[in-house]
Image: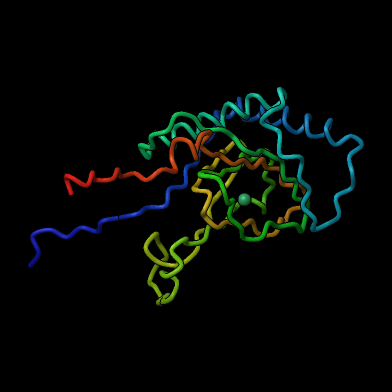
Amino acid sequence: MFKQVKAHDLFPTPIWSLDLEDERAGRLNRQILAQLDRMLSPRPEIPIGATWQTDQNLHTLPAFAELTEGINKAARGALDFMRVDYSAFEITACWANINPKGSLNTSHTHPNNYLSGVYYVSVPKGSGVIVFGDPREAAGAILPKVTEYNAYNGNEVTFEIKAGRFILFPAYLRHGVPVNRSEEERVSIAYNIMFSAFTQEMSRPLWSGIPLDKA
Ligand SMILES: [Fe+2]
């Protein structure tokens, strides 16, 4: 009956994943864990269920230069992919999360930034997912039963993670991390990205006024 049928995926929500080469990931992760141990010396006992975070300045420390390079490369790639026109962006915060057994990160967004992401340093078995929520609140008003979950139905997506993987996503996208059911710590490094000169270069209207004599 129809000459052509096509679903047009408008307003997609991109989540990028970038995996380091195995050798580089192993070396970088050992280096990051050693550095965190040095920063946490003497290492405090993290109570079961608590999440421990470093200061948010890791991107300014030479010991994290290789990680920072990866974050910047990933962000540049994402902005180019979306054809965003910008002069400069910067990492506005970068911090480590240490999640021992029983800890979790409740659902949240990262306001006042354009992109957010995480690099995974240590992901023990049983702690390897992050859950993203549908940012289209209205779409959750009716959630019919489905024959199969896919990108067109449901209101959250469980996303696989592993050590050596960067993920990057719009900062408005709600996400959370379920309980770490492993005996070992999950270690990740979170980061935010924002345009350096947002008010100067981007917050003006995208249109220009029509002079009165041409209106
Ligand atoms: Fe987060």
Residue 1 in the image, given as x and y percentages of width and height: 7, 67
- Where does residue 165 sit, x and y in percent of width and height? 57, 38
Farthest residue, direction front = 213
Q: 65 or 89: nearer the eye?
A: 89
Q: Report how many numbered discs are placed on residues in the image.
A: 0
Of 51 and 11, nearer the camera is 11
Residue 47 in the image: x percent, y percent? 86, 54
Residue in the image at 73% along x and 53% along y: 182
Where, by quadrant of the figure, is residue 83 drawn?
top left
**Relative to 204, is 39 on the left or the right?**
right
Is residue 47 rendered to the left or right of residue 164? right
Residue 201, image quadrant: top left
Which image quadrant is residue 85 in? Answer: top left
In the figure, 4 relative to 70: above or below? Answer: below
- Residue found at x 69% / y 46%: 124
x, y percent for residue 69: 58, 26
Relative horizontal placement of residue 2, taking residue 180 as reference (left or right): left
Residue closest to the far right: 42
What residue is drawn where x is 17% and y is 45%? 213
Q: Which residue occupies 67% across, 52% down? A: 127
- Closer to us: 213 or 50: 213
Q: How is the image coloured?
A: rainbow
